[in-house]
Amino acid sequence: MSPNQKELRIGLVGFGSMGKTHAYAIHNFPYYYQPMPYRATIAGVCTTSYERSVAIAAEYGFARAYHTAEQMIADESIDVIDICTPNELHYEAVLAALRAGKYVYCEKPLCVTAQQAQEIAAAERESSVFGGMVFNNRFMAPIMRAKQLIGEGRLGRLLSFSVSYEHNSSTFADRTPGWKQTAAHGGGVLNDLGSHVIDLIYHLCGEFDTVQGLSQIAFPTHDGWQTDADEAFYMTARLKNGACGTVVANKLATGANDDLSLTIFGETGSIKYSLTEPEWLYFYDRTRPSSPIGGESGFTRIECGGRYPAPGGGFPSPKATVGWLRCHTESYFRFLECVATNTPFSPSLSDGAYVQLVMETARASAARGQRMEVTPLA
Ligand SMILES: NC(=O)c1ccc[n+]([C@@H]2O[C@H](COP(=O)([O-])OP(=O)(O)OC[C@H]3O[C@@H](n4cnc5c(N)ncnc54)[C@H](O)[C@@H]3O)[C@@H](O)[C@H]2O)c1
């Protein structure tokens, strides 16, 4: 660590899917960002039980486990409280952290009611620190590019929009219920997926003026349990700038995995984006000349992929697809799994040798200017 590099000590509250995701991000910062302007360290973790927190700290190499979020917040050595707990628990933890002078990184949604949110905003104003929300979709490169295009006025006056976020998770009758299926725990799809897409419209298009909502529970009773939390939520909205559109958050979307689609239509241009195609932003520029057989009009596919501003963006190369690092991780993990159990790994060195043979044959074919058979060396 360089002497000028400030150390930021982070305490993780909750270590389910998002606690892991945040820890993964923190551990990997030095690979993605060079030079690192600060050093981020996971100082400790706190989950539902102390025993579980101790086990997690040991497994993931965190310095310590805490009994409660309160104990962690009271620890003078911690700079940032990272809240990854079920929604109903955010309110108290965010307030306590701000009042203790800790920076807060809070998973969406901020809390469960607008009254709670107002209290948090007031506490933040009165404190010497601040918090940040995890609206991670803002940091997909195509969304960053969309923001830039709208900011430059390339879409002109915004007219209309549609955004939908679809999962299939409420369509399985035999699924085990969790806090996300219980309204009292801050569950429901509007809080869950809806908060993401409402934020995207707010971020890209502006403040909301009026909304009309429709909530749906298609499976109130599953095998032996009941849900009172919305499974789909549909909303029409008018923004303060006059643009109108629809916002859909839907976990009754049979066949959908993590399908976020966004379209924004302006007077001089439009954009389209899909989370399932994270490399691209589609942009229609109405000022491009049209002609009887098309001219230059039509949607342009802008490559965004991993093009992040400095000090990020150098690793992995922006030309790598968004899933590139993930497949490296899978490949290496499976190889070591085979080593651990002393079973052969595929792709094997023989597979490598075969590819070598094909390359050599192709090279020879190019040199001779004739088609050649790929035959193993004698
Ligand atoms: N930004 C995103 O992409 C995204 C995705 C999924 C969930 N989320 C949000 O992240 C938050 C967590 O969701 P998740 O999917 O990780 O949930 P999860 O159920 O997988 O994990 C919740 C964690 O909180 C812990 N916990 C529960 N009560 C606690 C307490 N009193 N003190 C300390 N820890 C406690 C649990 O032990 C568990 O480790 C939610 O607010 C959710 O809306 C965000």
Image (cartoon, grey):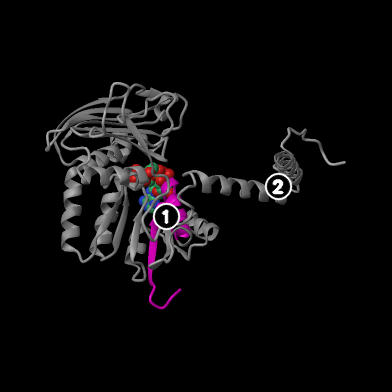
The reply to whether residue 112 is in sight is no
User: Does the magenta portion include 325?
Assistant: no
**Does 318 sit above or below residue 42?**
above
Name the residue rendered at 32%, 66% in the picture: 74
Q: Mark 1 touching mark 2, by CB under 8 A?
A: no
Inspect the image, locate mark 2, and give the three-letter code of the amino acid beneath it. Answer: Cys
Inspect the image, locate mark 1, and give the three-letter code of the amino acid beneath it. Answer: Gly
**Does 172 sit above or below residue 11?**
above
Crowdedness near tag 1: few (<14), some (14–19) or many (≥20) residues, C-alpha within 10 Å: some
Residue at the spot of label 1: 313
Locate residue 17, reporting x and y percent: 44, 46
Image side of residue 163 versus residue 18, left or right: left
Label 1 and label 2: CA atoms lie apart by 33 Å
User: Does the magenta portion include 6?
Assistant: yes
Residue occupying the far front of the picture: 369
Q: Which mark is residue 242?
A: none
Locate residue 350, reporting x and y percent: 77, 43
Residue at the spot of label 2: 338
Image side of residue 202 versus residue 188, left or right: left
Locate residue 92, reporting x and y percent: 27, 53
Q: Foreground residue, 96 or 246?
A: 246
Q: Which residues are magenta?
A: 1-29
Name the residue rendered at 15%, 56% in the picture: 122
Name the residue rendered at 18%, 41% in the picture: 206
Q: Quadrant of the C terminus?
A: top right
Instruction: Give residue 11's quadrant in the image.
Output: bottom left
The reply to whether residue 144 is in sight is yes
Crowdedness near tag 2: few (<14), some (14–19) or many (≥20) residues, C-alpha within 10 Å: some
Local secondary structure at mark 1? loop
Q: Is the residue marked 2 within 8 Å of ligand 1, measured from its CB?
A: no
Local secondary structure at mark 2? helix
